[in-house]
Amino acid sequence: MSIIVQKFGGTSVADSSKILAAARRAIRAQMDGHQVVVVVSAMGKNTDALVALAREISEEPPAREMDMLLSTGEQVSVALMAMAISALGHEAVSLTGAQIGIMTDSTHTKARIQSISSDRMREALDAGKIVIAAGFQGVDQSGNITTLGRGGSDTTAVALAAVLQAKACEIYTDVDGVYTTDPRLVPEARRVERISYDEMLELSSAGAGVMHNRAIEFAKRFHVPVHVRSSFSDTPGTMIAAEVESPHPAVCGCAKVKEEARMTVLGVPDRPGAALAVFSKIAAKNVAMDMIVQNVAANGCADISFTVFRGDLPATLRAVEEAVAELGAEGVNYDEDVSKVSVVGLGMAEQAGVARRMFRALADRGVNIQMISTSEIKISALVAREGAVEALRTAHETFELHREPIFAADLPKVGAAADGGRNAVEVAARMEGMEEMVIDDIALDAEQARVTVLGLPDVPGLAAQVFERVAEGGINVDMIVQSIEREGRASISFTIPRSDLKEALRVTTELSKELGCPPPTSAPEVAKLSVFGIGMRSHTRVAHRAFQCLARAGINVEMISTSEVRLNVVVDAARGEKALAALEEEFADVRL
Ligand code: ADP
Ligand code: ASP
Ligand code: MG
């Protein structure tokens, strides 16, 4: 008999009548001939209330006790949901994470799932019961209750669907699907019928709170089709599934991260392994870094900037201060009033000028870009927090996301057949933990050159000008990073096909002169190495391990960009093959 997993978020179980409505949905699915597992979140804003309560007691409560506290929210809702089903004349059993056997590591408040036992659930399902599983929680080897991070009930649901080899995982929430951006921030946002795993992964980690990004990692890895839909209506929702044939729109959506902070480590000695010292300290605290930008070194020293989730700022600061002391670096500064705005789309890789259009549009609205990081399917700009919503609206408008892309008719409709694909159990058996990172491929592009425009005044419009000039020269830009330098100056580095270097230098030298900046620098022969996989950004060890193995091989990293599905590093072309071999060896244990 086929299994369906249904997940109800906080607003969908906010009061008794909503719980009864959700219970009816589960019963309907059972009457349709499915075995049903229901995953529930805490009622309404209960988790927020518990967090606030803890903060009244202590500013930094022990993480273990935080998990003990937060897991109670879901325990209330599973019990009530089981009672509701029983009151409606059907059989149900509520189970906590520990009772199911959701084993996690011991990283309290953001634990990762290692394994899930399906025995108890299957037994109950075979006995005709609806299983009500507590979302967001698990248990570690020592029996401590853990939680998976805010929004983690989505991850529980998709992970259960994976181990049970469910036909589908339905996410019931307070919007009727995935929109081109948060409809609360941009009312013109449009619901999309279907979105690929990779695009949803990038969007959710770029701030689209409708799905927990780790849920999408599970979905992609185990080929679980995810159907996001409204718990208050029967509208069709959005299918998140494997990517369909091209064409893809250049941009499918945009998002902003609410709680971001930027940190810069100043005056790091420019030698292989120095950046590594910083990254390993941060990785040891389980903090995921994003938008990592290393300035091309001046006077033998480099500045390394990156962003982290704002809540991780105190832990990151402690880690970085240790590294600064060890390395004899100059110091550290940070800014909490920033926000990251990203645009995402699979078609971006095939269409030139997406970044340039975004930078121009932001400049025309007077939005200053503090940092830039691009990967093949995502462009992220760091802006002042107060301008972030304006930046998001601008991006949405610029790429006309309110309009249906013209070729949408070619895409399969919602409810189209689930993806075939690998046997989930077989894949899981090959991994140490269900949420371990997985690497599909490592690639080398040895035909690139790097240009760095230095000393740009930190005012709106400079990135736009740089890339407009470069585009006028008929040059396609690949990777872009922009970082803040001392005294409010910025530098922009980008890679291009090697044959375009002369022209790129000509146009950027001209622009630098006009702006009164020092002449651009370049590296005529660089290689870009890309590591493809799942969890490339959120697994704190990926960037760290990449740096570690390259440092060991004596290879300096010139540029880096991370996304959920890809880690790019730029190194000297002469070291390209050696870097490839080093990365292959380093990641051999997690290669699919
Ligand atoms: P639940 O409690 O059901 O898990 P969440 O609040 O976590 O619900 O997620 C739903 C909310 O996500 C929506 O109300 C919406 O404001 C927000 N959201 C952010 N980005 C998007 C997006 N791209 N599409 C749809 N909703 C989004
Ligand atoms: N209740 C948890 C939270 O609010 C988990 C979830 O709802 O997904 O973060
Ligand atoms: Mg949620």
Image (cartoon, helix red, strand yellow):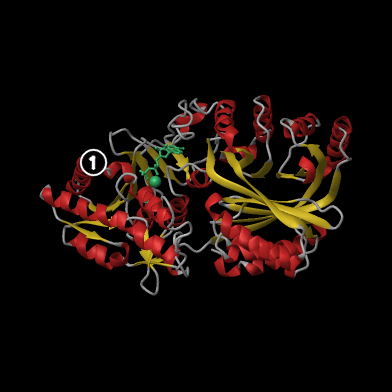
- Residue extending farthest to the left is 89
Percent x, y of residue 115: 39, 67
Observer-nearest residue: 303 or 27?
303
Observer-nearest residue: 167 or 340?
340
Q: Is residue 544 visible?
A: no
Splitting the image into 4 quarters, where does residue 521 fall? top right
Percent x, y of residue 457: 79, 36
Q: How would you rate the neighbour count of disc 1 (Cα within 10 Å): few for under 14, some for 14-19, many for 20 or more?
A: some
Residue occupying the point 42% across, 42% down = 210
- Residue extending farthest to the bottom is 142
Residue tagged 1: 18
Splitting the image into 4 quarters, where does residue 466 fall? top right
Q: Is residue 373 visible?
A: yes
Percent x, y of residue 445: 73, 52
Residue type at numbered disc 1: Lys
Q: Is residue 486 above or below residue 63?
A: above
Q: Is residue 287 above or below residue 244?
A: below
Q: With 554 as the anchor, is 535 left or right in this view?
A: left
Residue occupying the point 80% across, 63% down = 271
- Mark 1 within 8 Å of ligand 1, using the beta carbon: no
Q: With 541 as the anchor, is 239 left or right in this view?
A: left
